[in-house]
Image: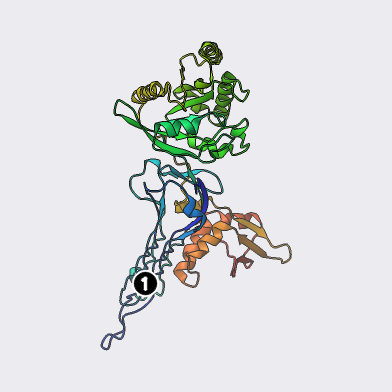
Amino acid sequence: MFSDKAKIFIRSGKGGDGHVSFRREKYVPNGGPDGGDGGNGGNVVFVVDPGLNTLIDFKNVRKYSAEDGENGAKKKCHGANGADIVIKVPPGTVVKDFETGKVIVDMADKTEPYIVLHGGKGGNGNQHYVTSTMQAPKYAQPGQPAIEKYVMLELKMIADCGLVGFPNVGKSTLLSSVSNARPKIADYHFTTLVPNLGVVETSYGDSFVMADIPGIIEGASRGVGLGYDFLRHIERTRILVHVIDASSREGRNPGEDIRLINEELKTYSEELTTRPMVVAANKIDLISPEERESILSGIRKSLDEDGYDDVEIIPISAATKEGVDKLLHKLSSLLQEFPRDTYVFESEIDIDDRSMLAELPFTVTKDPDREGYYLVEGPRIEKMLGYTNLETEKGFMFFLDFMKKNGILDELVKLGAVDGDTIKIYGHEFEYYAD
C-alpha cells in the first residue's frame, strides 16, 4: 500500500539531573562534594533508506521517543547518555512542523543521518559549584528538558521526468511500455491513485527516472479531489511531459487540456510552468493519417497562443509504441542540458533551537479576587520552572535573574506591585520586594 503523508510525534531525551552528594570515607569525615553529572538525552535522528518508497510504516507507529539521560550519582559517577531514536524515511521525504506547516528539513539531499531534535544536556553535579566562599554546595543543576513536537512527513517523489495529464489519457500505459514499472491499467477514470516510478533505458544506453503522476482534474491546485496529493509529486521533476489524448476519444479538446493543466500547475506553483516541457500526443493509432495533421496543427496553434512556441509536440502511441523512441531521445537530450541537482526545499524553522524559550509568551496579571496578589503564568515561565530548582538559593537567584531579564519584574511594577505583595507562579508563592 502506498502512503505519501504521515503525522507523527517525536520527542528528544531529557538530560539527566546532576547529583548532590559528599565524599564520606572512614578517615575523611568532611569530604568535599562528589556529585556526578547527568547524562545527555538521546537525539531524534532522521536517515534516508533507499529501500523505502512509501510512508505506510508511520501509519502503524506514530510516536518516536529517544531515551532520557540517566541522573548523576555519588563518587562523581556520570549518568549514562540516553540512546538516540533513528527514524528511517524514503528518499524525497520532507519533514514539516505540524503547527505552522514550515519546512524543518528536506531529506532529499541528505546522505548522512540528520539530527532534527537534540537531547537535553545533562546537568552538572554539585562538584562543579565549589567556590572560595561555598565549600559544600547543596545545589546540582537539573538536566535540560526534552523537546516534544508533532511533525508532518510528506513524500515528494524524485524523478527526472513527470507525466502529467487528465485521467485516462495513457500515462500509465506509456510508463509501462518504456520502463520496468507495472502500474495498474484499465479503461476507466482514476485507475492510477498513486504515483508510479520507472527507470527508462534508451537505445543510446543512457537512463533516467520517469514518474506517472495520477490524473489531474480542474481545481486540483485548490485541493479539489486529490489535487494536493497529486501535485506534490511534480515539484521535484526536472521535465514535465504533457500526455494528451490526441484522438479526443472521450470528447476532450487536446489543446484545451494542456491549457487547463498548465493553469493548475501555475496556481499550485508558478515555478512549475517555467520548467522544460514536452507534449506527448498519445493514441495516434486511433486517428487516421488524414486527420493527424489537422489535429496536431490545432494543438500547435493552442500552444503558440499560450506562449509555449518552443514546446515540441511528439505524436506517439503508447499502445503500439509508435513514436515512443523519438520521445525518449528528446527527453534524454533535454536532461543533458539541465543540471541533475534535485530540487530541495529550504529549511524554514528550527524546532531544535532551545533559545526559542525567549519567543514563548507569558502573562503578568493582578488577581481580581485578592488584594496584593499577582499571577505570573505562560509557557515561557512553565518551561523555565521545568529545569530550575527553586528549593536552593542558587536556583532561586537564577530564576530571579530570569524574571528580571525577561521584563517580568518591570510588568509587576507597572501593575502597581509594592513591597510585601504576593507573587504566585504556578505552585510557588513569593513575597515581592523592589530592588
Residue 10: give x, y in percent of width and height.
48, 56
In the rendered image, which quarter contains the C terminus?
bottom right
Q: Nearer the viewer, residue 412 or 379?
A: 379
Residue 237, picture quadrant: top left
Residue 306, picture quadrant: top right
Q: Secondary structure at mark 1?
A: loop
The colour scheme used to paint the residues is rainbow
Residue 69 as seen in the image, left or right of residue 28: right
Q: Is residue 77 above or below residue 181?
A: below
Question: Residue 236: in sight, yes or no?
Answer: no
Q: Residue at x 39, y 20 (%)?
A: 326
Residue type at the position of mark 1:
Gly
Residue 406: give x, y in percent of width and height.
53, 54
Q: Residue at x 48, y 30 (%)?
A: 163
Q: How many marks?
A: 1
Q: Residue at x 36, y 76 (%)?
A: 136
Q: Is residue 358 above or below residue 71?
A: above
Residue 415 as seen in the image, left or right of residue 353: right
Residue 40: give x, y in percent of width and height.
37, 63
Label 1 packing within 10 angstroms: few (<14), some (14-19), many (20+): many
Q: Is residue 186 above or below residue 426?
A: above
Residue 234 as seen in the image, left or right of residue 429: left
The residue at the far right in this view is 369
Q: Nearer the viewer, residue 363 or 2?
A: 2
Judging by the rendered image, the residue that carries numbered circle 1 is 72
Residue 122: give x, y in percent of width and height.
38, 64
Question: Residue 65: in sight, yes or no?
Answer: yes
